[in-house]
Every structure is written in structure tokens, then in C-alpha cells.
Image (spheres, rainbow, N blue to C red):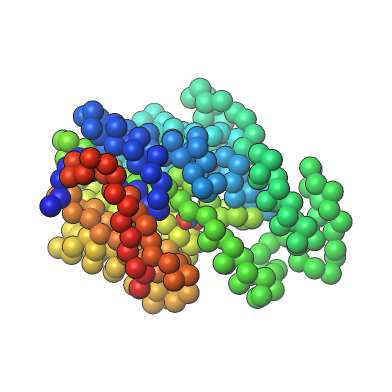
Amino acid sequence: TPSKPIIITTWSFVNATVAAWEVLKDGGIALDAIQKGASVCEEQQCDGTVGYGGSPDEDGETTLDALLMDGRTMNVGAVGALRRIKNASGVARHVLENTKHSILVGSLATQFAVQMGFHEESLTTPESKKLWSTWANENNCQPNFWMNVKPNPNMYCGPYHNHMSKERIQLMEVDRYNHDTIGMVAIDKNGDIAAGTSTNGAKFKIPGRVGDSPIPGSGAYADNEVGAATATGDGDIMLRFLPSFLAVEEMRRGSSPTDAALTAIKRIEKHYPQFMGAVIALNKDGQYGAACHGLQGLPFPFVVYDNSHDKYKIHTVNCV
Ligand code: SD4
């Protein structure tokens, strides 16, 4: 039996889910709960896939993508390829609340964040340096400002993936899946709905790359009249299909959350049979479902916290 309030989170990001639940349980609004949950992952570097010090780009820098969507107003705040600011979802909230815009990107998003009072700092850690240098060594890449790797002109050495061999691209497709994204959907005690995401994106991406996570309708979508959805996975492919928007629209037409998530996944599969990803859908009654594709044979986990348990519950769904 569905119950409200409710928070649902991609993967097994328990700490973030619990933090978001604390907000909802105390009567807080869905948007605040999601921002709180995402911020916890940004501080705790959930799996190294959210927040600073993970998924360095080709130049070794970590940049962040985040989105918040308010289903009451259909207002959106997002940042893409945000540099040198840890709390990406906090900046997204400022874009939502304090501007007429929806998405700010790159260094200029940093400039905005600093004006809003955020602290500017490096997002590089010893771990992200190591990740990058291992990759750079394997790829015989050019040295950049902190490494001293001999370039090999005969081999691929950045900067553009398009120049890579087919084999190398396939390897990277597997490797890039070693990262997740936090996506969250929530309903608060007033029945208001919100959704959001936060991620450090794909490893060794071309600097400037923005994934699916900060794109409204792709990484997440929320509409008080219907429900909300969030997506995770191979962002460059998934964002072409706006899977979160599609799942919400399917629910609007009467689909169950599970069927809605499945429709979104199937739409992508039709064109990209090898893609890896998952979609979670939540309707305004508090019913939810998920679907996934191609997670190397593994089921997709998601965390649910509502009044029906005294604690969170990790669900899994087998992929199609
Ligand atoms: C991206 N969608 O930037 C993110 C990564 C992800 O599970 O969700 N991985 O492509």
C-alpha cells in the first residue's frame, strides 16, 4: 500500500535517502528533502560517483552536474560541468530560486556560485589524480600540469574520443559504467512532488561534456499533477530520449509506474540495444516502479523510505 511522504533514490545510496527522509518526516517539503539527500552524496562522495574527487575528465578535472525540479511550479534549477564548487545541488537550488534561468554551465556557473556565497576550491583529490594518471599512462597521454607522462604519438592520446579505436571505445563503455548517479523522487506530506539528480558524470569525458543528469526530462522530471521520474546510466545516449519526461507522460496517460519506466527503457533499447541504464517512476498516489537495461546481468537497486517501514528498504529490479 502506497504511503506519503515518500522518498526514492537510485542505487544503494542509503545515507542520502535517510537524510532526505529526515526532512520529509519532520514535515519538510519534497524539494528540500531532495536537495538535502543530494548534498549528502556530494559531501560523502557516494561511491566516488557523486561529488568531488571522482570521474576526472580527460584533463584530470572533476566537474559536477546537478538538477532540481519543483513539481508545484515546474521550476527548474540545474548546473552542468560545474567547476570548483562541491555543493552542486546547492548551486542548482540557487539557479531555481534566485534566477529566471534554468541551467548554468562551466566556469560561469562557478562565477554565479561564488556570487551566491559558495566557496571555490579544487575538486581534485589524491584518488582522482591516481585514477586519471592510471588512465593517462594506459593511454600514453600527453602530460598535463601535474603528471609527467611521455606522449606516444602513435597511440590515441586524447583529446577526442572520436579519434579512438573501436576496441578502445568498447573498453571505455564498460569502464564508464563503473559510476552511478544519485537520482531522487519525493512526495511530501502536502502531496507536493520534486525530483533531482547529482553526479560527477562519465570518467575521462571530454572537458565540457554535460550528461543527462542536469537535463530536465532526462535526468529527472516532476509534475505535481502526475508524479516524478529519474534516470541513471549511459547519459550521452539516454538524454536523447528524455526518459524521465517520457515516464511521467506515460503515467499521465494512465500507465502504472512500472510500465511507464519500462516504456522509457524500451524506447532507448530500440535504437541502442547495448545501452546501460535505469529509470524510476513514482506517481502522485505514492505508487512506484523501476526498469533497467543491460547492467551486465545485475539487477538495479533503489532505496525507498516511507512510513510503511521504520527504516529504508532496498528494492531491486531485474533488467530487461
Ligand atoms: C552521466 N548519467 O553523466 C550519468 C552517469 C550515470 O550511472 O548515471 N551513471 O552519464
| Image position of 159 (left or right of 239) | right
- The answer to whether residue 242 is seen in the rendering is no
| Image position of 256 (left or right of 212) | left
Name the residue rendered at 38%, 65% in the picture: 299
| Image position of 51 (left or right of 17) | right
Question: Where residue 216 appears, x then y in whole percent?
Answer: 37, 50
Question: Where residue 235 appears, x then y in whole percent?
Answer: 48, 59
Question: Where residue 14 appears, x then y in whole percent?
Answer: 38, 44
Q: Nearer the viewer, residue 195 or 297?
A: 297
Q: Is residue 301 above or below residue 113?
A: below
Question: Where residue 100 appears, x then y in whole percent?
Answer: 38, 35
- The answer to whether residue 273 is seen in the rendering is yes
Q: Where on the picture, by quarter, is residue 268?
A: bottom left
Name the residue rendered at 29%, 69% in the picture: 263
Q: Nearer the viewer, residue 70 or 304?
A: 304
Q: Quadrant of the C terminus?
A: bottom left
Q: Nearer the viewer, residue 67 or 24?
A: 24
Residue at the limit of the structure toward the front, as seen here: 310
Name the residue rendered at 60%, 35% in the picture: 84
Name the residue rendered at 66%, 64% in the picture: 161
Q: Is residue 271 above or below residue 284?
A: below
| Image position of 287 (left or right of 111) | left
Figure label count: 0
